[in-house]
Amino acid sequence: MKQVVVIGLGQFGSHLARQLTQMQCEVLAIDQREEAVNAIRDDVHQALICDARNLDALKAVVTSNVDVVVVSLGESMEPSIICSLHLSQIGVKSIRCKAVNEDHATILKAVGAHEVIFPERETAERTARRVAFPTLLDYFPFAEDHRIMELEIPSAIVGKTLASSRLREELNLLLLATKKPTGEFQFMPSPNYIFKAGDILIVLGREINLARLRVLD
């Protein structure tokens, strides 16, 4: 079971801690506010009151053996920077920190953060895609401007075979799988696969080409 420490139990941190617990991670939730710790105590494996700016206090509850530490210490930059520095000194293998702006992100990386998170920005980008493209069900960032997207099948290719749809030749898209309304997957369909109404497509390609596929209707 993956061991995850979440430091900072505001709205983002507390929601993250609960979700990770539901995903079968062993979660230690930390905050210096007693009321925040009490509110989550029954929803995670362990919840402790601790000032993460204090190196000795942090060493007493977090070791280098944990898999991931997520730092979500509100809108003030200083506590998260100090906490990240302490975690780096402890030897934590994966430190992921919430940042409020680019300057904050740069400093966090300089003191030892391995990954910087912009929750509001990521949520806004995901929401914008859903508003602009209602058939988009989900997407996953890939290398550079490539994405893996899960979307409803465009009506223009219903009844066509994969080969005749020319997704690869004209749009440079790779169909990884189709999903039936029943939830059944067919991975790497053959060129003779016939697209059917209700199919969900899982496609890899550049975002600009995926956008062209989404507007084929």
Image (cartoon, grey):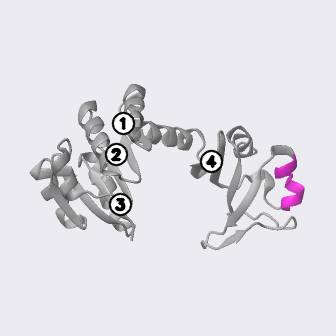
The residue at which mark 1 appears reads as 111
Q: Are marks 1 and 2 in contact (CB under 8 Å)?
A: yes
Mark 3 or mark 2, earlier in chain: 3
Q: Amino acid at mark 2?
A: Ser
Q: Are marks 1 and 4 in contact (CB under 8 Å)?
A: no
Residue type of the residue flagged with mark 1? Val
Magenta segment, principal secondary structure? helix
Q: Secondary structure beneath disc 4?
A: loop
Q: CA distance from mark 3 to mark 4?
A: 23 Å
Q: In the image, which residues are magenta?
A: 160-169
The reply to whether discs 3 and 2 touch (Cβ–Cβ < 8 Å) is no
x, y percentage for residue 207?
67, 41
Q: Earlier in the sequence, mark 3 or mark 4?
A: 3
Q: Is residue 211 above or below residue 184?
A: above
Picture disc at residue 19: 3
- Whichever of callouts 1 and 3 sits on the residue coming sooner in the sequence is 3
Q: Which residue is mark 2?
A: 88
**Nearer mark to the viewer, of 3 and 2:** 2
Tag 4: amino acid: Phe
| Tag 4 residue | 142
Q: Position of residue 96 (x, y in %)?
A: 39, 46
Residue 169's place in the image compared with 191, above or below, is above
For the residues labelled 2 and 4, say whether their Cβ atoms are less than 8 Å apart: no
Residue 59 vertical position relative to residue 84 in the rendered view, above or below:
below
Q: Say which of marks 2 and 4 sits in front.
A: 2
The location of residue 216, given as percent across then percent down, is: 76, 44
* Residue drawn at x 66%, y 69% as measured from the top left: 180
Q: CA distance from mark 1 to mark 4?
A: 27 Å
